Amino acid sequence: MKALGIDSSGMVASVAVVEDDQLLAEYTVNYKKTHSQTLLPMLDEIVKMTELDLSTIDVIAVSAGPGSFTGLRIGSATAKGLGLALDKPIISVPTLEGMAMNLSLCEGLICPMMDARRNQVYAGIYRFEDGSLVVVEDQMAVPASEMVEKLNGYQQPVILLGDGCDVNKALFTEGLKVPYKIAPSNLNRQHASAVAALGIVYTKQGKETNARDHEPDYLRPSQAEREREERLKGEKA
């Protein structure tokens, strides 16, 4: 089975092609460019370098959220457009599950953490059993301090990853009472290869959807939606 993976949930833009257990190609950029500028040129370069016929793709796996609202919309639109053009199904891979997949050979708890601003993080808790991803606590939007309390409650070593680690290092140093490590730079951010690999697993589990029906999972309202709701509450008061 051959899967195209797309991740534009954060600053990183990443495109990959995985066939069964083999990574054929991956193009990942962590730089200040909009994903609308990067995703399709990256895919085009992969197609050229590997002489890939996109019609041979079995499924398109896309990081479906949470993450950057703009990034998720661009990734979703790209996946939907390709899915409709190629008549291929979509696999919506939760962003944090894709990140956890980076550490599939690690023991203990894995906690991907993305900066959600306002002192919050998007985070989840996972582990691997016999090589399979197990969701210990599903992805959520919570204050970073609450995530620290959750991890302390498990009383187990944990590996942290994601840009949420960068902004909360002091909090971890002061608050985490369990042994922890932060994943190295080559494993610390989103990778489309992990999304594609999970896409193959989830396809075999029957989780694919029609491209027309795919929607990103923002996990919480956007800032514009929150501000609108606050204005409406103020008008009613």
Image: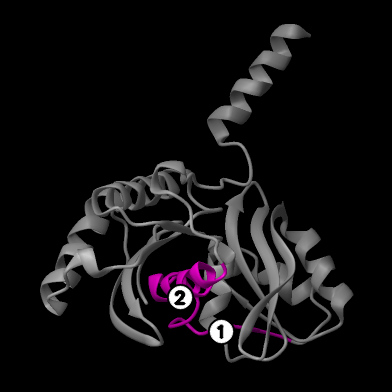
Q: Is residue 204 magenta?
A: yes
Label 2, on which residue? 194
Residue 128 x/y as whole percent: 66, 84
- Mark 2 or mark 1, whichever is nearer to me: 2
Label 2, secondary structure: give it. Answer: helix
Q: Residue at x 70, y 55 (%)?
A: 140
Q: Quadrant of residue 197?
A: bottom left
The front one of 151 and 198 is: 198
Residue 46 visible to an observer of this rendering: yes
Q: Is residue 115 left or right of residue 17?
A: right
Residue at 46 percent of width and 81 percent of height: 185
Residue 149 shown left or right of residue 222 in the figure: right
Local secondary structure at mark 1: helix
Q: Which residue is mark 1?
A: 103
Q: Position of residue 97 (x, y in %)?
A: 58, 68
Q: Which residue is at the front of the view, 131 or 14? A: 131
